[in-house]
Image: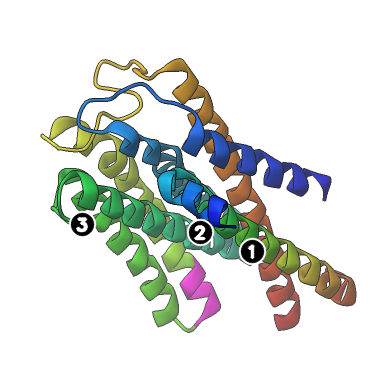
Amino acid sequence: MDALYSFLERNSYYVVLIITLIIWLGLFLYMLSVDKKLKKIEKEHEV
Amino acid sequence: MKSKYFLFVWMLGVFCFALLYPIPFIPALGDKARVLYFHVPTAWVTVLAFLLSMVYSVQYLRKKDILYDYKAASAAGLGLLFCILATVTGAVWAKFNWGAFWNWDPRQTSIFLLLLIYGAYFALRSATESEETRAKLSSVYAVLAFITVPFFMFILPRIVESLHPDPIINESGKINMDRSMLMIFIASLAGFTWLFIWMLRIKIRLAKIELSELD
């Protein structure tokens, strides 16, 4: 863990990459859950 | 459904390449030039969304189908969201390149005016109670508002002195970018466009449910 920490400290690019990927993952999962919920409501309403 | 997972993987690839793939030395910008992989696609999606909003508004005025008004508002809403993202990413970049978040550079001024114009679109919508009047007024407004978009996004920044880096297609009408950077940029552009289409389709589906509830 210490080795990973010191690696990230020296290569800040990877820190930015990890943050960006976490944000993207969060956004994507949110969109996917909205999509699924919507499909369920559409079935109920038969739009 | 599978295409959404493909989009996820596509954007993962774009993020990794955008941040890690070496870029040539660009004077005064250096690695900060990588912001173009995210900042420019948000501005592109803004234009696309406002264009679609105008197209749907014209369709509403022609066919008087209220669904087109909902579609126009959905596209304009997403356009406003991406416009805010372009403004914020640009301001963060400006802090590190120009020394301040806001400099009233022609680019910043023009995007600020666009935010005001499309903010007024939603103010107009919420100020009108009757659905039909709201649809008519906001459709006409959306058409008129879009006329200003090419001027603020493409013409003004090219005719006024600005500190902003050259647009992707520069004054001489040529693309002056390293080949590998251009490939990553196009991939990012495609990914963001795809994401926007997905978001817009979800908003339109929601609008349809809202309409069926009203009936």
The amino acid at mark 3 is Phe
Assess whether mark 1 and mark 3 are in contact (beta carbons under 8 angstroms). no
Q: Which residue is mark 1?
A: B203
Assess whether mark 1 and mark 2 are in contact (beta carbons under 8 angstroms). yes
Q: Which residue is mark 2?
A: B78
Residue B54 visible? The answer is no
Q: Which residue is mark 3?
A: B101
Q: Are marks 3 and 1 on the same chain?
A: yes
Observer-nearest of A39 and B54 = A39
- Secondary structure under tag 1 reads helix
In this rendering, position of residue B73 left or right of residue B96: right
Q: Quadrant of residue A27?
A: bottom right
Tag 2, which chain?
A: B
Observer-nearest of B172 and B152 = B172
Q: Residue furthest front?
A: A2
Identify the mark nearer the N-term, 3 or 1: 3
Observer-nearest of B129 and B6 = B6
* Quadrant location, the C terminus of chain B: bottom right
Instruction: List x then y, in percent, for residue B25.
Output: 30, 23
Q: Are marks 2 and 1 on the same chain?
A: yes
Please give the name of the residue rendered at 80% of the width and 66% of the height, measured from the top-left corner.
A36
Instruction: List x then y, in percent, for residue B145.
Output: 35, 54
Report the mark closest to the observer, 3 or 2. Answer: 3
Q: Is residue B123 above or below residue B88?
A: below
Residue B63 lies in the magenta-colored region: no
Residue B132 lies in the magenta-colored region: yes
Q: In 3D space, how far apart are the residues under numbered discs 3 and 1 (Cα atoms)?
A: 32 Å
Q: Quadrant of residue B27?
A: top left
Instruction: List x then y, in percent, for residue B192.
Output: 55, 44
Please give the name of the residue rendered at 44% of the width and 43% of the height, measured from the top-left corner.
A11
Bounds of the magenta segment = B130-135
Observer-nearest of B155 and A6 = A6
